[in-house]
Amino acid sequence: MLREVGWVEKRGEDSMYTNYETLRVEKKKGILWVYLNRPDKLNVFNMKMLKELSDVMDKVEEDQEVKCVVITGEGEKAFCSGADLGLLSKLDSQGALELSEIGQRLMKKIESLRVPVIAAINGYALGGGFELALACDFRIAAENTQLGNPEVKLGIIPGWGATQRLARIIGLSRAMEFLMFGDRISASEALDMGLVHKVVPQEKLREEVMSLAERIVEGPTIAQGLIKRVLIFGSQVPLDVGLELEKHAFSTVFSTEDAKEGLRAFLSKRKPEFKGK
Ligand code: COA
């Protein structure tokens, strides 16, 4: 909308997601595939990758063609092995504060994005890479995946959200053990904890993620965006405040074309055709 009325600069669609040094981005049928693209370094985050991923999220907010985002790692070994430890080793306290703020801002951007985000975890998801997966709405993991927050083994703690998001997903007791010892867990252990939604063989990961993403793309985009935001923000506030959020989101969704289509389709006994409007 902001673009249509001239508030946001129009860009050529083809060049919108190109020219990244640390990412490879593909847009196909409403799904934006974002590959963290430093496979030789197990897709570790450097400052450039943080900035580029943040830039992609900003563009998705403007790009109404995108109805679902998938984040995955290039190569077969890693989703993302965290922040670059060479760079971390040079930080003082002020630098660490700044890095934490930059990472937290990116994770919040992903968490509050207007469309669902899937983490297709294709191998090691460690430290900041694991925190990236925690900020996504769905986590589908390949069988060979290992997940963890090993920071404590380095004498430090996570700084991009794990101390807050993890307990909200798996409960305080399990999060305590997970972060206090920093041991890696397998995909099947993560599944048992409710930390990932599904575990699939590595060669089936793309297909599984694609079918989930296609289901999302067929759905009512605005309602889906409201569901994720009300769930996430609602879990951070008292029940009465959450219920207020729900009430206004419920009211908002009634102004969408998709709500009219969904209700009309049910009454006409046909499948709805949502447009994301
Ligand atoms: N920071 C910087 N470089 C990293 C990295 C990180 N977090 N994780 C991996 N790499 C680099 C390695 O140094 C190596 O680079 P090199 O080829 O130039 O030596 C390359 O990625 C491949 O990793 P390697 O360690 O050789 O692979 P492996 O299969 O033997 O081990 C891991 C894989 C993930 C177990 C191991 O790389 C590891 O423990 N990494 C650190 C993970 C971590 O602590 N992340 C949290 C950071 S807060």
Image (cartoon, rainbow, N blue to C red):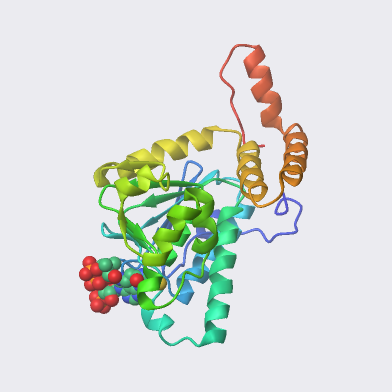
Residue projecting furthest to the front: 173
Asked if residue 12 can be seen in this view, the reply is: no
Q: Position of residue 111 (x, y in %)?
A: 57, 54
Most foreground residue, 38 or 243: 243
Above or below, 21 against 184 in this view is below
Answer with left or right where residue 173 lies relative to residue 264. left
Most foreground residue, 208 or 261: 208
Asked which quadrant contains residue 151, the reply is bottom left
Q: Residue at x 68, y 61 (%)?
A: 9
Above or below, 125 against 4 in this view is below
Most foreground residue, 160 or 61: 160
Most foreground residue, 194 or 21: 194
Q: Residue at x 46, y 36 (%)?
A: 214
Quadrant assignment for the C terminus:
top right
Numbered label tally = 0
Answer with left or right where residue 270 lies relative to residue 210. right
Q: Position of residue 232 (x, y in %)?
A: 61, 48
Asked which quadrant contains residue 67, the reply is top right
Q: Position of residue 167 (x, y in %)?
A: 51, 54
Ligand 1 shows up in which quadrant of the image?
Answer: bottom left
Above or below, 83 against 110 in this view is below
Q: Position of residue 108 (x, y in %)?
A: 59, 60
Answer with left or right where residue 6 lies relative to residue 127. right
Asked which quadrant contains residue 206, the reply is top left
Q: Residue at x 66, y 13 (%)?
A: 267
Asked if residue 148 can be seen in this view, the reply is: yes
Answer with left or right where residue 250 lies relative to residue 35. right
Q: Residue at x 66, y 30 (%)?
A: 258
